[in-house]
Image (spheres, rainbow, N blue to C red):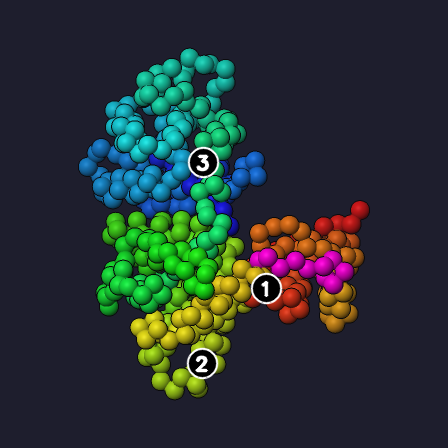
């Protein structure tokens, strides 16, 4: 699975970065106020333009003044720029070019990344001379935009796609990339060390020991894998230290680049909301997922507890019902090889093609077993369906009216498809189209 490109939006305070961010991702996700410095933490969102998907990262304003969090915000912006494939540098046309803009431009020269100069809060058209003063920064001709009114944003998105490197060419298709995610101190680094057979990661009882995402390459039964151990993700409200903010973005970009995500929890203690929030990051990216219950060696009465623990996991991770659950001990290396078996099963499921005739037999049987309920003034009727070409299993069903699809019936159909054809650990996409 090719990763999405990453775009970082940077600039000084109050130039309209958050408004531009919201315009690009087409939702009001960032806090937007006319108070400099209101966006302190990086905020990310998914965007798409010309069928190309990418991740957008909004950053706090970089300032030379001695303001609260100024150093932290500057470091966050530097981190975002390091992770980015393309950097969007935003200026405020109402202020013109000022010294802080020139300082930020010098930072951008050092990144060696493609930089797009954007002059925001520009509400006029046709005055080319307005862009001349900004060309003195040496970053090329600026794109004049108004994020509030949408002026020039299409041109900006065109330029982003043009400058975005072809990430598909950067990935070895023979290697399966595994991202290990989870809150601090659940044993991610211990698992990596057990899998690769060497103490490459620092292992400690202190939460948050791993501060970066590290690649480990290995072969198992002739198959190549790259395992990425990410720093533990804490709740955003508790991310105070700069290194942890750095780790949070690294974890997001690691999930983005992975073929399979391994969500690790501590099976010896109760599940927390933070465990489910972390799983949600992978779910939102629509990734194949395996849930690993680590520290099983610390659990008493294992045979009695295993079903109880699995029920607890299913209850907390209702949105990940398709994920396989494996209980291991990274410390004792108990059952860790089952992870590769599960990954290989996922790879097989991703390559599985269902004959149209067989798929329609399952659809017809499903409708006989459980007819669709009345919804939005009508009852759903599925005429026929088929699997379409896609990385994840994707099925198109032609129906009388897509608005009649109730979410519970969609889930029922998905469960029937899994029951008949497998697809454990893999998200399924169901598309309903009106038959014409």
Mark found first going from the N terminus, 3 or 2: 3
Which label sits in the foreground, 3 or 2? Answer: 3
For this rendering, which residue is in front, 411 or 222? 222
In whole angstroms, how far apart are the C-alphas of marks 1 and 3?
A: 32 Å
Residue bearing mark 1: 423
- At label 2, counting other C-alpha atoms closer than 10 Å, the crowd grade (few under 14, some 14-19, many 20 or more) is some
Say which quarter of the image contains residue 261. bottom left
Query: Residue drawn 44% across and 78% down?
Result: 309
Say which quarter of the image contains residue 88. top left
* Residue 209 seen in render: yes
In-image side of 175 versus 42 (left or right): right
Residue bearing mark 3: 165
In whole angstroms, how far apart are the C-alphas of marks 3 and 2?
A: 46 Å
- At label 3, counting other C-alpha atoms closer than 10 Å, the crowd grade (few under 14, some 14-19, many 20 or more) is some
Q: Secondary structure at mark 2?
A: helix
Type of secondary structure dominating the magenta stretch: helix
Residue 338, position as x, y percentages in the image: 45, 71
Above/below status of 197 relative to 214: below
Which label sits in the foreground, 1 or 2? Answer: 1
Q: Secondary structure at mark 3?
A: loop
In whole angstroms, how far apart are the C-alphas of marks 1 and 2?
A: 23 Å
* Residue 39 seen in render: no
Query: Residue drawn 46% across and 55% down?
Result: 176
Q: Is residue 253 magenta?
A: no
Residue range (magenta): 350-359
Q: Secondary structure at mark 1?
A: loop
Above/below status of 251 relative to 365: above
């Amino acid at each position: 699975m090719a990763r999405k490109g990453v775009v970082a939006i940077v600039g000084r305070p109050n130039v309209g970065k958050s408004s531009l961010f919201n315009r690009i991702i087409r939702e009001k996700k960032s806090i937007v106020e006319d108070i400099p410095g209101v966006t302190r933490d990086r905020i990310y969102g998914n965007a798409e333009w010309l069928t190309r998907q990418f991740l957008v990262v909004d950053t706090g304003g970089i300032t030379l003044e001695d303001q609260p969090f100024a150093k932290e915000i500057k470091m966050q912006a530097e981190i975002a720029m390091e992770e980015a494939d393309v950097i969007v540098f935003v200026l405020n046309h109402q202020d013109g070019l000022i010294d802080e803009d020139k300082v930020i431009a010098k930072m951008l020269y050092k990144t060696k990344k493609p930089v797009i100069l954007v002059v925001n809060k520009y509400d006029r058209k046709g005055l080319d001379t307005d862009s001349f003063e900004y060309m003195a920064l040496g970053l090329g001709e600026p794109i004049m935009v108004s994020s509030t009114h949408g002026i020039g944003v299409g041109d900006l998105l065109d330029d982003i796609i043009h400058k975005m490197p072809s990430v598909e060419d950067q990935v070895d298709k023979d290697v399966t990339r595994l991202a290990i995610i989870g809150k601090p101190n659940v044993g991610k680094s211990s698992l990596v060390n057990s899998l690769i057979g060497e103490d490459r990661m620092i292992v400690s009882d202190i939460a948050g020991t791993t501060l970066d995402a590290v690649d480990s390459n290995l072969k198992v039964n002739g198959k190549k894998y790259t395992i990425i151990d990410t720093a533990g993700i804490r709740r955003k409200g508790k991310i105070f230290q700069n290194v942890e903010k750095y780790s949070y973005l690294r974890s997001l970009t690691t999930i983005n680049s992975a073929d399979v995500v391994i969500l690790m929890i501590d099976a010896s203690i109760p599940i927390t909301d933070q465990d489910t929030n972390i799983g949600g990051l992978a779910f939102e990216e629509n990734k194949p997922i395996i849930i690993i219950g680590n520290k099983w060696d610390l659990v008493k009465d294992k045979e009695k507890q295993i079903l109880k623990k699995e029920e607890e996991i299913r209850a907390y991770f209702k949105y990940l019902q398709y994920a396989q659950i494996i209980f291991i001990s990274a410390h004792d290396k108990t059952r860790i090889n089952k992870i590769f078996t599960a990954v290989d099963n996922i790879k097989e499921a991703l390559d599985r093609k269902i004959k149209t005739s067989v798929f329609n037999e399952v659809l017809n049987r499903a409708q006989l077993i459980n007819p669709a309920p009345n919804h939005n003034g009508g009852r759903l009727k599925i005429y026929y369906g088929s699997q379409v070409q896609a990385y994840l299993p994707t099925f198109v069903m032609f129906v009388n009216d897509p608005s009649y699809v109730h979410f519970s019936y969609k889930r029922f159909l998905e469960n029937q498809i899994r029951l008949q054809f497998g697809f454990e650990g893999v998200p399924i996409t169901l598309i309903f189209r009106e038959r014409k």
